[in-house]
Amino acid sequence: MNPADKDTNKATTARELLIEQYFLPFLASHLRDQKTDAFTFCCNPEMNAQMQELKLNVNATGQYELHKLTKEQWTKFRHYFIEKRCFNQNWIKNPNQKVMDLLLSSLALIMCKKVPAELELKKVEKLFERVKLLVTPEFEARSDACVVRLQLPRDDNGDEFEQDNKAVAVNSRPNTLPYTTVVLN
């Protein structure tokens, strides 16, 4: 194999995707090729508190401006996002710790515009706009709004129920509804 060949930068087996130098380009191309505007993560109250401690700016859409982090903020954000798993109990309980570390560290690199230049990824300068970490919205009791939280159903032992032939329908154009719908997943 010629190391200068472009194909040596791509994973040739599923196992190689567990290596960051192959997974990050795979994830970046997946995010670029998706039809959706962005993948959004909504902070839970614990993560919101830590983000406020970092004194991060929030733009008009409620998204943390992670691409403007200082080195100290980046180190703390990485700790909260990857090691503490955003204080998300489902992520903490996930038995595939190595895979979670790889996925979350890759997402953190993309969100914070810190994708290594050595990977020579195409169109990476705007990729951070495709993954968003949102401030948890403040909700007040209203009759013209609702919050929908999607979670996998579990039995008494914590095992997931079979999901075949089951779906949740959410209006794809919520701005056409006479009320506000927020979906937390």
Image: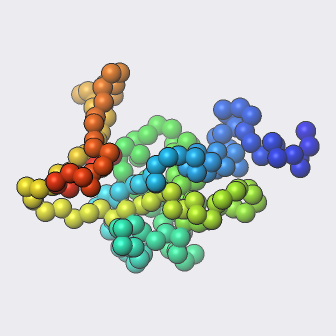
Residue 17 position (above or below residue 154): below
Residue at 67% in and 49% down = 25
Q: How is the image coloured?
A: rainbow
Q: Which residue occupies the extreme left position in the image?
A: 143
Left or right: residue 94 versus residue 151 is right
Residue 140 in which image quadrant = bottom left
* Residue 100 image position (x, y, % from top left): 51, 45
* Residue 166 image position (x, y, % from top left): 30, 25
Question: In this rendering, does residue 27 appear at all?
Answer: no
* Residue 48 image position (x, y, % from top left): 33, 65
Left or right: residue 146 versus residue 169 is left
Q: How many marks?
A: 0
Residue at 57% in and 75% down = 71
Question: In this rendering, does residue 131 appear at all?
Answer: yes
Please tell me which residue lies in front, 19 or 128: 128
Residue 1 in which image quadrant = top right
Residue 90 position (above or below residue 134): above
Q: Which residue occupies the extreme right position in the image?
A: 2
* Residue 103 image position (x, y, % from top left): 54, 48
Residue at 10% in and 59% down = 141
Residue 41 in which image quadrant = bottom left
Left or right: residue 153 versus residue 71 is left
Residue at 26% in and 63% down = 137
Residue 150 position (above or below residue 13): below
